[in-house]
Image (cartoon, rainbow, N blue to C red):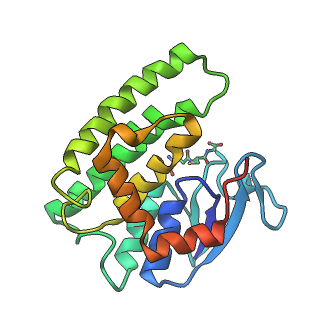
Amino acid sequence: MKLYYAPGTISLMPHVALLESGLSFVGVRVDEASKTMADGGDYRTINPLGYIPALVLDDGSVLLEAAAIVQYIADRDPTGQLAPSHGTVERARLQAWLNFLSSELHKGGLGPLFYTALDERAKDVFRQRLRARFAFLDQHLSTRAYLLGESYSIADVGLYAMTGWTPRVGFDIGAYPNLAAHHARIANRDAVREVHRIEGPVPA
Ligand SMILES: N[C@@H](CCC(=O)N[C@@H](CS)C(=O)NCC(=O)O)C(=O)O
């Protein structure tokens, strides 16, 4: 398998999943802004829409969408630690969180704050939505260590990646102590540290 990743993006989630699973893969770095791959090629030959991540499977086909990619990895993970089994309500809850992260936090909250063309009034709409969602998460995490309860899952890394974007868009999560504690907890995982070491700093 080949994972196309860029530092500071949601590709952190499948990158950590791959390391934690122990599955064999090759990582290919992509420059998020120019869409240039490490070998100089155009990443849009992998994903015509240009967004990251993408996973190329051993049969050469491409799998897109972080939520689907991490579940594909989790289902092949011999340790079984990344996701609950299919057909269980716990698996449905994992899917609910992955969907929440992708739609409510990423595209409907934090993502728009990166757009320099949006004025402050427009960004305030998204900041307001984020405050409600962060308060909801903070309450949820007040009685549990992880999104699914006492069991870690790959969705925790997705949340960690997104809370990691908040300083870059001037959003302080200090007002949400349980969310901040969750971020610190996930930051301490060996695979998370290792992925940061491999990926290096987020380009300016
Ligand atoms: N729906 C996609 C969205 C991925 C996405 O938006 N990735 C961002 C980085 S976090 C990206 O590549 N943005 C650059 C672009 O859209 O051109 C997923 O969840 O995998």
Judge whether 47 appears above or below 62 on screen. above
Position of residue 117 measured from the top left corner of the image (x, y, whole percent)? 67, 22
- Residue 88, by quadrant, is bottom left
Question: Which of the 4 quarters of the picture holds residue 55?
Answer: bottom right
Quarter of the N terminus within the rendering:
bottom right
Given residues 51 and 128, the one toward you in this image is 128
Q: Residue at x 63, y 58 (%)?
A: 7
Image quadrant assignment for residue 150: bottom left
Image location of residue 111, percent across then percent down? 53, 36
Examine the rendered structure and indicate whether residue 139 appears above or below residue 161.
above
Q: Can you see residue 61?
A: no
At x 49%, y 65%, the residue is: 14
Q: Locate residue 92 relative to residue 185 in the image: left or right.
A: left
In the shown orientation, is residue 76 left or right of residue 150?
right
49 relative position to 10: left or right: right
Q: Position of residue 47 (x, y in %)?
A: 64, 53
Tell me, yes or no, if residue 58 can be seen here.
yes
Using the image as rendered, state which of residue 40 and residue 12 is in the foreground.
12
**Which residue sits at x=49%, y=54%?**
65
Q: As drawn, which residue projects farthest toward the top?
A: 121
Task: Name the spot of residue 153 as percent of width and height, x first.
Answer: 31, 66
